[in-house]
Amino acid sequence: MSPAPLRVALVGYGFAGKTFHAPLIAATPGLSLELIGSSDAAKVHADHPQAAVIADPLAAVTDPRADLVVIATPNHSHAPLARAALAAGKHVVVDKPFTLDLAQARELAALAAEHQRLLSVFQNRRWDSDYLGVKQAIDDGLLGEVVHFESHIDRFRPQVRERWREQAGPGTGVWWDLGPHLADQALCLFGLPERVIASLAVQRDGAVVADWAHVVFEYGARRAILHAGMLAAGGSARFVVHGTRGSLVKPRADQQEAQLLSGLIPGAPGWGKDDDAFAWHDEQGQSALPAPAGDQRRYYMAVRDAVLGVGANPVTPAQAVALMAVLEAAVASAEQGRAVAPALSEHEREAFARS
């Protein structure tokens, strides 16, 4: 007999909760979206009429009806809500960024171990078509030794919007919004960098937090360049990877976010399909390599299996701690104008060790 579905409480029904978490959870077999923490019950029930709605976030993360709590609230509330959920005996998923600083990340990792509960961070971009294609090419040795890795999440949003991510406050700005995706993918591919060099800027009229980020990870002779900006109308590729055997270019990004925004149900025909092929360049010239399909549901499938004891945590607390150190190193580098080494112990650096 199949086990009973894990009962899920999704806390936060803003952009991340509504667009990503709720559809992915609802489309994952073995998960049941029981309740949603939100102050707007009408908005929730328009999409999920069966879900209970709790206005108080603290009450939502400790509600006895939930086995698994997913925290998709503003960044400054991640740590206190995760702390409360773990203390209440819940398994916990936290949207990125995990916490606001390294001390909070270490505290939550220790708390999860103490209570013997799963703690994971929502790094859904590990299951994007573009990243999966790059990873496959590197793992297969197609590129030889990678010497230059470039990853862009560029958008054209010249008007500053009225949302907390673009307002002054802890954990706001483009690096804390998109940097966790860019950095996590680089760490999965290459491990922890020796040093981080970063530049952050405020470029748009009316912007009050950084809306442009350019960060370089140093790995001996290899460089990983991570870039995000809000004034890029076109002309930059999602990935550019140069190696000793050739170069791989992915012009456009994975389409799952666009599909979710259009209302496509995860798993429906066409879900995760990417018709934008990779361009492969070598001594013979240029050819096209098809992009694999993406499927961000695989994150929640892995979380489900880990809670049930039949699989591994897809994003471990140790990885979340290591990533937080790298994000902090970038901020310190931008502020100090120098290269900064992530403040991790040798044991902590093993979280992203490459075989």
Image (tube, rainbow, N blue to C red):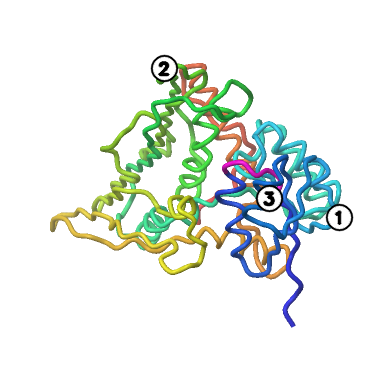
Q: Quadrant of the N terminus?
A: bottom right
Q: Secondary structure beneath disc 3?
A: strand
Q: Position of residue 102 (x, y in %)?
A: 66, 33
| Residue wearing tag 3 | 93
Whether the magenta-drawn stretch holds residue 292 is answered as no
Disc 2 or 3, which lies upstream in sequence?
3
What amino acid does circle 1 point to? Answer: Pro
Q: Is residue 351 visible?
A: no
Q: Position of residue 146 (x, y in %)?
A: 34, 48
Q: Position of residue 260 (x, y in %)?
A: 49, 54
| Residue wearing tag 2 | 205
Query: Magenta stretch?
Result: 10-15
Determine the residue positioned at 37% across, 40% down. 222
Badge 2, how many Cα within 10 Å: few under 14, some, many 20+? Answer: few
| Residue wearing tag 1 | 64
Whether the magenta-drawn stretch holds residue 11 is answered as yes
Q: Secondary structure beneath disc 2?
A: loop
Q: Position of residue 299 (x, y in %)?
A: 58, 58
